[in-house]
Image (tube, rainbow, N blue to C red):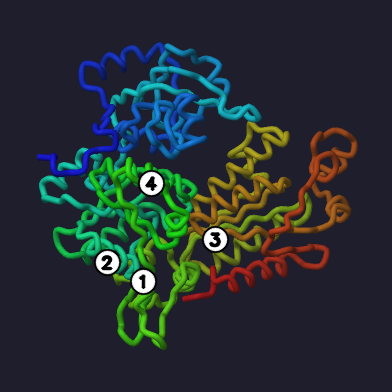
């Protein structure tokens, strides 16, 4: 039934899920083994391995295979392979592992997914605590997904579907973005040019820096798939972790495409330079997959349709909407032109990216003890509650220390843990459309930036530096803390015996020697209005 399909890379689809009773044997024996909870990107790698998407690999690479791939894109046995597939573990775990032993691979909840027969434990980077474990893998089960289960198809399942529908030539389009009208036009044109059907593989690896989260991305692609001619296009989810795009990544994606039964791989026009650089002929021949660059499609106003860039008539007006402008329009609640995308795709994007006045956001105060952070934060809290429309939560430094971080001291490590906890709580509030007001000292720049990155993924982040000078803060000293610190009674006190790193990236800077608390809070409100977080109907 599957004979007419392109064979898997290496000739055999290497599905590594063990059958019963082997699974029960591995589960019972694992009680005596060390284990490793896989990180999100490692879960993706494991799933691609055990489903056969990485055929002919049967496990994580040893040092010999890794070094050969890095040096010449070949495994130690000479088989072409473009990218190292390794399992990294911390040195403390690596020290407990020995060749001939076993390692249980678990998900974040501790569920055992696979057993790794340790062939080698090797140091990947002698300048860092970076160790790798290589060896064959046997899976007890696939990683558990509760989202889009009907679309999470293994290579074997996709191949059976192709055979059922009689698809011989298939173009794979692996995407980490929504499909708008330009992408629809280019994928449709490529499929027609190849006289092939189309597999849209939506990348769903966590940690992607793409424009939307994978839930929104899949929903957008579900909305777009109906625009293709019936029985010519199929949608599936690919557990592919983000990588730096380049020739090696492109070749790995070609391997994946072939193992899923595809004869062609369509890459975005922006990756055309990779093709222009040239793929060595032997590799292209061995892979058995034709890599095709999508030709840029331009919307010609006079014709009212997308046209290949090379076919645009002279003097015709071309309309553009860059990704940055798209996000600005979403943030401002402005119209997305009908020529740019499909209505239901835009609807999904608006659900994921509401205008700023409907987004959650965090106002993060930082400054010395006694600078006025808590007072300004309290005034701001009252004013935002008075406005209404969104729940507002105050995470004051002292309150958090008492209720969330009571076991922590004031070492740099413990201070960073405390600020990360505040950032996590604020991110959850922000993600759910609320307003978080945080007012810790937060003396270290690196952890403040980590919180910004975390929170900006789900909403707005406004850093307010209360820059009141040390001498003024010390004069106030309402709690007597500076006096105790000067007397040596409080060690590691910020501004006295511990440093304060002033932020260079604050959106608002306030000096309370010049401003009353109400005036300072008003400055923050004015910035929030200017940025679009408040004030709109």
Residue denoted by label 3: 460
**Residue at mark 2 to residue at mark 4: CA–CA distance:** 26 Å
Residue denoted by label 2: 189
Tell me the element at label 1.
Answer: strand
3 vs 4, front mark? 4
Depth check, front residue: 146 or 288: 288
Rendered image: mark on residue 281: 4
Q: Which percent across, then down, holds residue 211? A: 45, 59
The disc, 3 or 2, on the residue closer to the chain's N-terminal end is 2
Residue denoted by label 1: 297
**Residue at mark 1 to residue at mark 3: CA–CA distance:** 33 Å
Which residue is depicted at the point 37% across and 78% down? 337
Tell me the element at label 3.
Answer: strand
The disc, 2 or 1, on the residue closer to the chain's N-terminal end is 2
Tell me the element at label 4.
Answer: helix
Residue 190 lies left or right of residue 83; in this view the side is: left
Q: Which percent across, then down, holds residue 394? A: 59, 53
Q: From the image, which quarter does the N terminus lie in? A: top left
Tag 2 and tag 1, C-beta contact below 8 Å: yes
Residue 258 lies left or right of residue 450; in this view the side is: left
**Residue at mark 3 to residue at mark 2: CA–CA distance:** 39 Å
């Amino acid at each position: 039934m599957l004979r007419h399909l392109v064979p898997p890379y290496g000739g055999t689809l290497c599905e590594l899920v063990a059958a019963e009773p082997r699974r029960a044997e591995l589960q019972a024996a694992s009680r005596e083994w060390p284990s490793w909870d896989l990180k999100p990107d490692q879960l993706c790698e494991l799933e691609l391995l055990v489903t056969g998407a990485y055929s002919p690999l049967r496990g994580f690479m040893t040092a010999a295979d890794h070094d050969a791939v890095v040096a010449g894109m070949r495994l130690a046995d000479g088989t072409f392979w473009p990218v190292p597939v390794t399992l990294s573990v911390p040195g403390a775990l690596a020290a407990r592992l020995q060749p001939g032993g076993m390692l249980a691979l678990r998900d974040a909840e501790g569920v055992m997914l696979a057993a790794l027969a340790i062939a080698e434990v090797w140091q990947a980077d002698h300048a860092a605590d970076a160790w790798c474990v290589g060896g064959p893998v046997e899976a007890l089960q696939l990683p558990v997904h509760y989202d889009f289960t009907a679309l999470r198809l293994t290579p074997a399942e996709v191949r059976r579907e192709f055979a059922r529908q009689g698809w011989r030539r298939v173009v794979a389009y692996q995407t980490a973005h929504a499909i708008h009208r330009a992408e629809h036009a280019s994928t449709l044109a490529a499929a027609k040019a190849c006289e092939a059907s189309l597999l849209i593989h939506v990348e769903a690896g966590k940690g992607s820096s793409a424009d939307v989260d994978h839930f929104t991305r899949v929903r957008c692609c579900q909305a777009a798939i109906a625009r293709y001619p019936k029985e010519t296009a199929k949608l599936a989810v690919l557990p592919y972790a983000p990588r730096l795009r380049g020739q090696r990544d492109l070749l790995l994606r070609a391997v994946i495409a072939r193992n899923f039964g595809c004869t062609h791989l369509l890459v975005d026009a922006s990756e055309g330079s990779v093709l222009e650089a040239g793929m060595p002929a032997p590799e292209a021949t061995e892979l058995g997959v034709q890599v095709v660059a999508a030709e840029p499609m331009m919307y010609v106003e006079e014709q009212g349709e997308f046209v290949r860039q090379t076919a645009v008539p002279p003097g015709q007006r071309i309309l553009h909407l860059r990704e940055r402008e798209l996000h600005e329009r979403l943030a401002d609640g402005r119209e997305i032109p009908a020529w740019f995308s499909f209505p239901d795709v835009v609807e999904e994007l608006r659900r994921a990216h509401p205008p700023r006045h409907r987004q959650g956001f965090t106002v993060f105060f930082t400054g010395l003890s006694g600078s006025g952070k808590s007072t300004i934060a309290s005034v701001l809290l009252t004013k935002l509650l008075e406005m209404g429309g969104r729940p507002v939560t105050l995470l004051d430094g002292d309150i958090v220390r008492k209720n969330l971080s009571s076991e922590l001291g004031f070492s740099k490590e413990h201070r960073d843990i405390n600020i990360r906890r505040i950032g996590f709580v604020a991110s959850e509030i922000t993600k759910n459309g609320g307003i978080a007001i945080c007012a810790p000292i937060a003396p270290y720049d690196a952890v403040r930036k980590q919180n910004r990155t975390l929170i900006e993924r789900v909403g707005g982040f406004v850093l307010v530096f209360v820059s009141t000078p040390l001498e003024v803060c010390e004069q106030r000293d309402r709690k007597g803390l500076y006096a105790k610190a000067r007397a040596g009674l409080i060690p590691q006190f910020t501004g006295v015996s511990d440093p304060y790193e002033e932020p260079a990236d604050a959106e608002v800077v306030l000096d309370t020697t010049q401003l009353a608390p109400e005036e300072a809070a008003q400055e923050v409100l004015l910035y929030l209005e200017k940025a679009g977080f408040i004030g709109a109907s």
